[in-house]
Image (cartoon, helix red, strand yellow):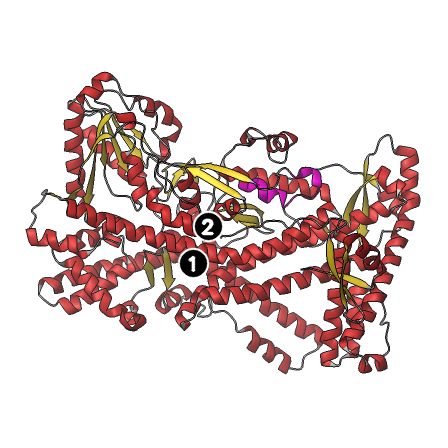
Amino acid sequence: CIDLHQPNSAARKKAYNADITYGTNNEFGFDYLRDNMAHSPEDLVQRPHHYAIVDEVDSVLIDDARTPLIISGPVPKGDQHEFNELKPIVNDLVETQRKYLTGVLAEAKKLIAEGDVKEGGFQLLRVYRGIPKNKALIKYLSEEGIKQLLQKTENFYMQDNNREMPKVDAELYYVIDEKNNQVELSDKGVEFLSGKDDPNFFVMPEIGMEIAKIEDQGLAVEEEAKLKEELFRDFGVKSERIHTLNQLLKAYALFEKDVQYVVMDNKVMIVDEQTGRIMDGRRYSDGLHQAIEAKENVKIEAATQTFATITLQNYFRMYRKLAGMTGTAVTEAGEFWEIYKLDVVEIPTNRPIARDDKDDLVYKTKREKYNAVIDEVTDLSRAGRPVLIGTTNVEISELLAKMLSIRKIPHNVLNAKLHKKEADIVAQAGQPGQVTIATNMAGRGTDIKLSDEVKEAGGLAIVGTERHDSRRVDRQLRGRSGRQGDPGSSQFYVSLEDNLMRLFGSDRIAKMMDRMGLKEGEVIQHSMISKSIERAQKKVEENNFGVRKRLLEYDDVMNAQREVVYKRRKHALQGERLRVDLANMIFDTSEGIAEGNKNANDFKNFEFELIRYFSMASPITEEEFTKQSSQQIAGTIYKAAFKHYRDKMQRNADLAFPVIENVYKTQSDRFKRIVVPFTDGVKNLQVVTDLQKAYETKGKQLINDFEKNITLAIVDDAWKTHLRKMDELKQSVQLAVHEQKDPLLIYKFEAFELFKVMIDQVNKDVISFLFKGEIPQETADTIREARARRQENLETTKEEIPNIDERAAQNRAAGNRASQSREMVETIVRDKPKIGRNDKVTIKNVMNGQSKVVKYKQAIPLIDKGEWVLVDE
């Protein structure tokens, strides 16, 4: 079992090498991510992904599919934020909207009562768009004909692609879209927040125009650079401020205490919406968790940044074979096939089911529903039957507990706040007359034991206080009773004020109840109503499936990119293909310099870029530059640069060898691995190398470790930054909907451009450091023993790149802390097999562009000479 051992430990590696390895799904995903953050082949633990069997497969592959696993660490300056400064104005904004709309609701009620349904409906829709969860609004919508009026008005304003909707939103400060969990500031809201002091407080500067203005002033170079720097700083501050503000607004408008999260021990803890348990150690990403901390007046933790991420969906799709089991997969058969290509097979129960599943009881209001639940529970308990009450959140379970206490009925509560006592409460749940209130029973209570006395009384009674969004969770609750052919019963209580009925219930039920003229406390029970509720659940399931499928489409873009980055990382880590990758980087950079400057016919810049990236003078004259094609120029640069690089590395090895020899002869009994400093004049890099190998290879091992170290360091830093940019891109492309464009297509296009720029930058940064990297002259004093330092704080500054051991320790620390951390976002990969010595590869001549196919072992000497490069197929 992998969960019994520390991440990246030898014991965990041993667990993976067993014939059968088991553990929690998250840990498998995190180990995959940690393996792709490792800085030494010895740190890798996972084997290739062959065959996985997943328990509770619907919960893992469907409910958790939208939730990616994320390993994150602190951001430099991560504790600098404006949450506390901006919180009062956001609080004022929310209060102002609430007060205004409370008045509008009263006005709407008055107009509708007077018969002016047009204006009344308009005002009612405005209230619904601004405060949809308001209790007075929900109560009013359960009155006769009101829900239909709202839907009719909404349909009118939504026609022609929401053309008329701005009239409704004109007086609102922000609009809440409850179905998609989004909140959007209006112009009026921005105006309110900017205040009178600084109307440009949230207005982003138009970068292009502002730069043009600065350049037109004809200032000195230093002055111009200073103004541009200020402009970029202003842009950065404002974009961060807008982001902080949006997250605070979300925290206030969309997130409710004791529903999505609870506050315990002065910390904000997320509640798992599927199981009702606290998700310990997890935080919402992207500053949202900090916003909720600010709202609840608890300590705001430092911000974190994503280092690596993958959705469970993508992790399990890497397995060649996948299987699983669950009691409730039939309703999701379509999704299993469409996304995972898995068939669902239903196995009949061991004994016939004796449980009595009754039709739903539908009430008009929540108050009537809860009173009816308490009456029913009292009768059942007195009849000597154990009762299990299923609720959808902590708040309702606590309300029902209070109501039972008033009736003096002993009971136990099992929810996110009391999950530590879970086993004891479940063990007692089968006693005669015992009442247990539980939040979402997925994976809980399978061991409720019933005595013969209880079986005779009718078995365990299930009472559901609300239909869940998904039919599957309702089936799980029902399935706690009537196990192995035992008697039992299940009954759901529903009201028109429940979230499911409010958001997705059709008006047919509301109309029917209006037609029957139901009085306070009266109830309907009919199979037609139960079917109608199932249809509403189906709508929600389809909606959620749509969200998951869309997420997967976004994910696939990241997948392709991750494959490239992780492949390059693996080459550097294992060293066998790194030389080929470096040769390709030199060639790509040569080609970029040649093409860019040849097209612009700029020899001066051409010389400058050669010095900047390759630290060498131009191998061709200006005359040759003018006459030759960019292909010829690129080939010439490549040959010169490759030779220059090999000579330089040889010089570095020769320079370091006497010192290595000295240390080896005098202190090899004390030192096994040593640290050698390299610098390019700006950054310092501490290279760890094996003392004996460095001595035996006359310094060549040191150079190999230098190449590996710098490649890993730069690829990792670039990838982290790229992940953040991709997150920002995903947010910004959603605006494309307003331009009648598909955000996904724009995302794919923009993501490709971002990736191209990132890879190009990585090539240039790696090449630049390798060509400029020198061993300082005072090396003898600076070579010391390498120690793996375990650093909890993952902060790295621009000037200092930690050495391999330090980075590995940092990443292990990040992994340990994040092994529970899961949030909303992206992605994964199957590694291509490594090239065998006798495998066929395609190589290309740098001078004339000719390609040919040869065995890899024949290609290596040609590539080493610098005349050919390997082509990725």
Badge number at residue 246: 1
Q: Is residue 426 above or below residue 650?
A: above
Q: Is residue 521 left or right of residue 845?
A: left
What residue type is disc 2 on? Met
Q: In this view, does 132 lie to the left or right of 826?
A: left
Q: Is residue 31 magenta?
A: yes
Q: In this view, does 39 lie above or below 719?
A: above
Which quadrant: the N terminus? top right
Q: Is residue 553 left or right of residue 760?
A: left
Task: Give how far apart the Cα atoms at labels 2 and 1 are.
Answer: 16 Å
- Residue 182, image x, y percentages: 37, 58
Q: Is residue 576 left or right of residue 551?
A: right
Task: Bin the neighbour count of mark 1 within 10 Å (Cα to Cα): few under 14, some 14-19, many 20 and up.
Answer: some
Task: Tell which tag, 2 or 1, sits nearer the viewer.
Answer: 2
What residue type is disc 1 on? Asn
The part of the image, by quadrant, that contains residue 407 is top left
Which residue is at a point 74% across and 76% down the rendered structure image?
Answer: 597
Q: Is residue 667 above or below residue 455?
A: below
CB contact under 8 Å: marks 2 and 1: no
- Residue 194, image x, y percentages: 42, 66
The part of the image, by quadrant, that contains residue 439 is top left
Q: Is residue 602 above or below residue 330?
A: below
Visible in this render: residue 797?
A: no
What is the magenta range?
29-44
Q: Does the magenta stretch include residue 274?
A: no
- Residue 640, image x, y percentages: 85, 66
Which residue is at a point 25% across and 64% down the rendered structure image?
Answer: 126
Between discs 2 and 1, the one toward the N terminus: 1
Which residue is disc 2 drawn over?
824
Which residue is at a point 64% across and 61% down the rendered structure image?
Answer: 758
Badge number at residue 721: none
Depth order, front residue of 258/226: 258
